[in-house]
Every structure is written in structure tokens, then in C-alpha cells.
Amino acid sequence: MADPTRRKPPLQVVREGNPGKRPVAEGVSVPPAELVEPEWTDTFADVSGDQGAVNARCREVASREWQRVVPVLEFTAGLGSVDTATLTDYCICVARIDQCEREISVNGILMLGERGWQKNGATTIVGQYRTQLARYIGELGLSPSARGRLTPPDNMGDDDGDVFD
């Protein structure tokens, strides 16, 4: 059962109707800005050896994720420059999850250690990154349920104000 004391997000009120005719709360507006992709070598350093190849892949995965989600989020969520750190962390989480999954694929879930078979440390790390990723998905509106809680930016230049155009 839904919490009766919790207010519905404005978009949900518009979608489901407002039989009580109570005023619909407006969302917080952030000035729109062109988000600039961060320099991934600051996070994933360009080093030599095997770690250099791992970092290069992380840079590629993070960049690909940035280019995939930012255009959509600029339109649907009205992101501003204040959201750059959250988006950067989101992309880092995606890259680290990819890195951990590749480590698990190469070395397996269990590894033979000094005390016998032990869980691969990457399984713990990937679990922590997935937990953090779920939080970012909720904050950024990247899941169907999270999108329902977001208030979209103003009518994006339309003059009729219909949110379902």
C-alpha cells in the first residue's frame, strides 16, 4: 500500500488526474547547461602494462556511457552543470562494474588462495558498485519507476504546455 502522507510527484498527478483540484507543486528548476564530458584520464590514469590496458577500457566504457545517457537526460531531466559530478560518478560506476565483471570472467568467482578456495575480491567490489549504481539510477531517473518521480523541464519550447506531446 502506498504511503498516504507522501505526496505524489507532479508528473504523476498530471498523468493520473487531480480530482481534488489541489495546486500541483512545481519542481525545482536548474538552469540548463551544455554538459562537458570529463577528461577520463584524470580518473583512469594512462599507465603502462596490464593496468594501462584495463584503464584504457575503463575510459572507453565511461565515455561511451556518458555519450549514451547525457543527451537523453538533458532532454528528460533538464540537467544542469551542477549535475556533472553525479553523472561522472555514475559513469565511473559503470566502468568499474565492467572492470570487475571482466576480472571475475578471467579468474572465476572462487580463487585458490593461501587458505584454500576463497571468494574473488572482485565479487565484493562489484556488489558495492552495483549498490551505488542503483542509487545513481534512482537520482538520475534512468529506470522506469525513477522516471515517474522526476519532474521534466519546462515544455521545451512548446507553447501549449502539454507534457505528453
Image: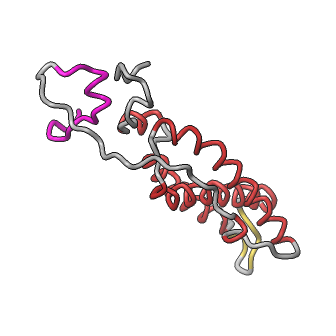
Place residue 6 in its image quadrant.
top left
Q: Is 117 colored magenta in this rendering?
A: no
* Residues drawn in magenta: 1-18
Instruction: Look at 45% across and 42% down and name the residue there.
Output: 78
Instruction: Look at 31% across and 46% down and name the residue there.
Output: 28
Q: Position of residue 58 (x, y in %)?
A: 73, 60
Q: Is residue 71 above or below residue 62?
A: above
Q: Position of residue 25 (x, y in %)?
A: 21, 37
Q: Position of residue 32 (x, y in %)?
A: 46, 46
Q: Is residue 146 above or below residue 163?
A: below
- The residue nearer to you, when weighing 99 against 64, is 64
- The residue nearer to you, when weighing 6 against 111, is 6
**Which part of the image, by quadrant, shows the C terminus?**
top left
Magenta-drawn stretch, dominant element (helix, strand or loop): loop
Q: Position of residue 71 (x, y in %)?
A: 59, 40
- The residue nearer to you, when weighing 132 against 102, is 132
**What colour scheme was applied to this rendering of the protein?**
secondary structure
Q: Is residue 90 left or right of residue 38?
A: left
Place residue 44 in its image quadrant.
bottom right
Q: Is residue 51 left or right of residue 30?
A: right
Instruction: Look at 56% across and 37% down and name the residue there.
Output: 72
